[in-house]
Amino acid sequence: MLYPELQEVTIAPKDKLEEDLYAGKAEIDSCITAYVSKMFAVSKKDLPGKKEQPLTTDGMKAKARAVLPKKQENGPENQLASIEIQSPKGESPVLEELEEADEASEVVLGFARLYSGILRVGSIVHALLPKYDPTLEPTHPYNQKYIVSATVEGLYIMMGRELNPVDFVRAGNIFAIKGLGGKVYRSATVCAQGKRDVQDGVDPKSWLVNLGAVNRTVSRGFFHMLIEDIEPDI
């Protein structure tokens, strides 16, 4: 994946990034590298925390006690005064429509696999788009268009169609990530240092890697090979 043009079965890592990737390390100081293979949308109401949980027996009793007015010792007049007057349902149709529209809206998540490191909610990461050129510096004007910064808003372990929220993900897991919507539209490589936030003073090339990069050298060679096969001998 890192060197698709090489034919050797094994190759020694040349830096800490490759060492963490080859071993799939999940330590505190391990480089965080994840590949987002696709983006998908889910309804907000299907996210954890939005679904209505079934009431237990104790929950139903507590709800009944909250609904019934409390009896007062000073007579029926105070009892009537203690009853809360609730506005009829549908008094604010605009508010109800906004709430229904919010529940019907969608959230974009990324389907990813973590190859090294420990990714946590709240971490600041860099997403490298497929056209990011690793031969150029990250600050190069060409690469600036294909590298975006994002904050991990949520992490989910997928169990069938269920999304189970977690605080962190360790290397080797397949998960869903929230926070890349509007920045990544197809695929990307999520990279970060082995800390919660990106630190200054560290060479970005030591922890940035584009796992989804298009190998232009191989592509051009394959293209020329096809042209030679198609062109007739003169």
Image (cartoon, grey):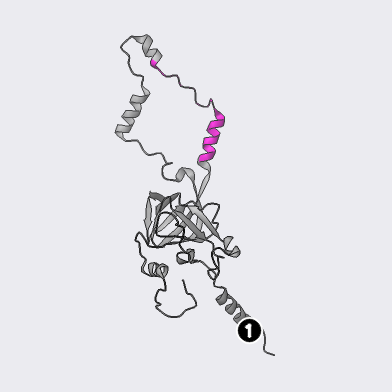
Residue span colored magenta: 82-102
State the residue lying farthest toward the front. 201
Q: Residue at x 49, y 51 (%)?
A: 179
In the image: residue 230, left or right of residue 189: right
Residue 172 sits above or below residue 42 on the image: below
Residue 86, percent across and down?
Answer: 46, 21
Q: Is residue 89 above or below residue 75?
A: below
Residue type at numbered disc 1: Glu
User: Is residue 92 covered in magenta?
Assistant: yes
209 vs 223, left or right, is left
Furthest residue to the bottom?
Answer: 234
Where is mark 1, residue-wise? 228
| Label 1 crowd (10 A; few <14 / some 14-19 / many >=20) | few
> Foreground: 65 or 171?
171
**Which residue lies at the image location 43% right of the left edge and 80% below the top edge?**
8
Where is residue 75? Give x, y as percent: 33, 9
Quick check: can you spot residue 159? no
